[in-house]
Image: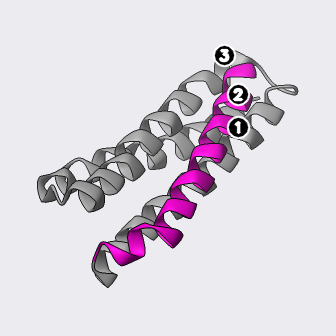
Amino acid sequence: MKLALVGGAVFMALAVLFGAFGAHSLKEMVSTADLLTFEKAVRYHFWHALGLLVIGAIGFHISVDALRFPVYLIMFGIIFFSGSLYLLVITDTRWLGAVTPFGGTAFIIAWILLAYQLYRA
């Protein structure tokens, strides 16, 4: 599945970029607690981007239609979970923490839906 493979590769590159930014630039600018929040965002971003690559590989073995919605949900999750935490830390806009659970919920639904689709295949 091309979308998952390309999206996964792009999201992986962005995870490395954000991780490097956090490790080298951000640590001088924010509190230790905020740095831990940023690192959590990078960790979830990284693992879910890797998950997209795995789903893309699975797309060579089962119907792409069965994988499309989980891929969209994971992309949504990366943007809303990790993205909201990145912005929360960088801009000190605390209300963005209210957005984060939408991304986390998307991750959970995506993995459950993927399990269901793999079971059905």
Residue 116's image quarter?
top right
Residue type marked 1:
Ala
Compare marks 3 and 1 and give the one earlier in the sequence: 1
User: Mark 2 = which residue?
Assistant: 6
- Magenta stretch: includes residue 29: yes
Looking at the rendered image, the quarter that the C terminus falls into is top right
Using residue 29 as the reference point, say whether residue 114 is left or right of it: right
Residue type marked 3:
Asp
Residue displayed at 65% across by 26% down:
67
Which of these two is toward me, 75 or 10? 10
Please rate how many residues cluster around mark 3, counting C-alpha atoms within 10 Å: few if below 14, some from 14 to 19, many from 20: few
Is there any visible trace of residue 79 in the rendered image?
Answer: yes
Residue 57 x, y percent position in the rendering: 83, 34
User: Mark 3 = which residue?
Assistant: 65
CA gap between label 2 and label 1 equals 5 Å
Residue 120 x, y percent position in the rendering: 71, 31
CA gap between label 3 and label 1 equals 20 Å
Which of these two is toward me, 94 or 27? 27
What is the magenta range?
Answer: 1-30
Residue displayed at 65% across by 32% down:
117
Question: Which numbered disc, 3 or 1, marks the residue closer to the eye?
Answer: 1
- Assess whether mark 1 and mark 2 are in contact (beta carbons under 8 angstroms): yes
Is there any visible trace of residue 1 in the rendered image?
Answer: no
Q: Which mark is residue 9?
A: 1
Residue type marked 2:
Val
Residue 77's image quarter?
top left
- Magenta stretch: includes residue 20: yes
Residue displayed at 40% across by 76% down:
27
Q: Helix or strand or loop: what does disc 2 sit on?
A: helix
